[in-house]
Structures are given as C-alpha cells and as structure tokens.
Image (tube, helix red, strand yellow):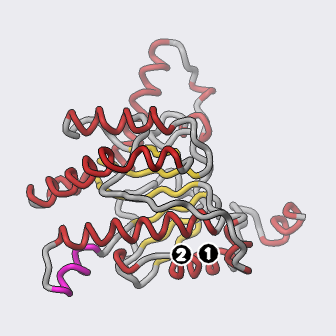
Amino acid sequence: MPPGPTDDLIVPPLAGAKTHDVTDQAAKHALHVAIIMDGNGRWAKARGQIRTFGHKAGVDALKRTITAAVDLGITHLTVFAFSTENWRRPESEVSDLMGLLRAFIKSDLERLRKEGVCVRIVGQEAGLPADIVGMVNDAHEKTRDNSRFYLQVALNYGAQADIIEAVKAIADQVKAGTLSQDEITPDSFGGFLSTRGLPPLDLLIRTSGEHRLSNFLLWEAAYAEFVFQDILWPDYGAEPLKAALEVFAGRDRRFGAVEAAHAKHAT
C-alpha cells in the first residue's frame, strides 16, 4: 500500500539533531525504531474519560516522540496506530479514530511536507473507507521526496495478513514464470511486504507494561531488540524514549553469532 500519515498528528517544527551522551550513541545504531503505542484507553479511564480522550492525548505524545526521535538521530519511526483487529472495537471509537486521521491530513500535511518528513502508511487498503485511501495516497505523493525523517504509520495493519498477502503475490509471480523459487530469499520476500524499502528494524518499544507483539512487524522484528516500558502512551515523550535507547545501547546484538565471533566481526 502506498504511503501516507496518521491520526490527528500535528507535528511541531522539528529541531536539529543534538547530542545526548549515551542516548546519542545508541541512536547512531538504533536508526529504525518502532513503537506499539499502547495505553490510551487505560489512561482515559483513570481520568474518568472516554477512550477517545485518551486517543487525542496519544496524539500529543506522538508529536513529542517524533521531535525527540529527530533530536536523537533516529531516521525512521514506525508506529502502530490501528490494527486489523481494532475493527472489533465499538463503531463510535473506530469512527473517531478515522476522524482524527482525516483531520490531520486536511490540516497538517503541508506542515509535515515543509518540515522534510516523508509520511507513509503501511497496512491494507481493503476495508478502509474510500476517502481515507485517497487521502493517504495523496499524502504520500506530496511527501515521498522528503528525506529528513521517515514516519511510517501502521494503519489497518496486521503482520500475519501482511505476510499472507506477500506469499500470495510471490505465488502469482512463480506461477507466471516471472520469479523462480531460487530467487525467493529473506531479502526478496521483504520486498513483497507493505513495509518494503524500510531499513532493518533495530528497536521495538511497547508501552503500558504489556509484553507481547500483538501481530506487529513479526517478520521485520527478526533481529530487533525489544524494550517494554511501564508507561501509558499519552505520558510518553523524550525522556522515556531516551531511556529505551539507553537500554538498547547496553545490548549485545550478535545476529545469531557467538559473542567472540561477533566482537571480531565488529572490529
């Protein structure tokens, strides 16, 4: 699915890259970060509010996090905004979420474009309202040449469905004789996913204290580091992101090699 933007995302002017000691060092390696933005509903409930109140507060958290990501030298941020399973939520909540997306595209796309942000939607077009499909495709066309920062929003996304669609596309090409079985490799397979073209995922963060992937980036997270943080998404921002990067900096990423072999390769 071609790229485009998210919810009620109104991004402030992006500050230039800064140094943040260990977190800056971590960001040099954690260039692609993904976040499962969890906890909006619980945050709203704790304040006696409806879930949409939490989703709106989550937009502010996303704005803070995008700015922090740029400051820390992260180049790609992929966020989980709406899963294929989220259609099971109350119709009013789904409608509110789609309304936030429409409002963002209408009011803030031009600002994103001027700030040099490339906005991309990953997920399935099927099932989305027709006007949403048109709007997100147009949003990507207007920002596709930007290269300062890459924001991917997973909308109507489920990793299992994404993998199945990739398998179907590969099967069609093999049947048509345009792709041989020997040409099917991890790299070529990734080119059939809706996340195609993105760099390898370095760090996956989940907020709210939950410890599961919830069908998010199952293929892409093969060698990613996971950090689970006990903070509800509307409270997220620069400090929690720095903390996650510090944890990442302390990890020994061996990519399947033993420690000695990995150290030798790293030098």
Q: Residue under circle 2?
A: 241
- Main SS type for the magenta part? helix
**Vertical comparison of 88 with 141: above or below:** below
Q: Quadrant of the C terminus?
A: bottom right
Provide the secondary structure element on which disc 2 rests: helix
Q: Give the side of residue 176 with respect to residue 75, left or right.
A: left
- Kind of residue at disc 1: Leu
> Distance of mark 2 from mark 1, alpha carbons?
6 Å
The relative height of residue 217 versus residue 180 in the rendered view (above or below) is: below
Q: Position of residue 53 (x, y in %)?
A: 20, 72
**Farthest left residue?**
91
Q: Please give the name of the residue rendered at 51% of the width and 80% of the height, measured from the top-left corner.
A: 240
- Labels 2 and 1 touching (C-beta < 8 A): yes
Q: Quadrant of residue 28?
A: bottom right
Q: Residue 95, how many percent across, how many down? A: 14, 53
Classify residue 242 as left or right of residue 103. Answer: right
Dot 2 alpha-carbon crowd within 10 angstroms: few under 14, some 14 to 19, many 20 or more: many
Work out whether residue 42 or residue 251 is closer to the camera in this orientation and state it.
42
Q: Quadrant of the N terminus?
A: top left
In this image, 245 relative to 59: left or right? right
User: Helix or strand or loop: what does disc 1 sit on?
Assistant: helix
Q: Quadrant of residue 85?
A: bottom left
The residue lying at 57 percent from left, 82 percent from top is 243
Instruction: State the image coordinates of residue 41 (x, y, percent, origin top left).
Output: 22, 74
Find disc 1 in the rendering and name its residue: 245
Residue 14, picture quadrant: bottom right
User: In percent of the image, x 32 and y 69: which residue is there?
Assistant: 58
Q: Which residues are magenta?
A: 40-47
Q: Magenta span has 119?
A: no
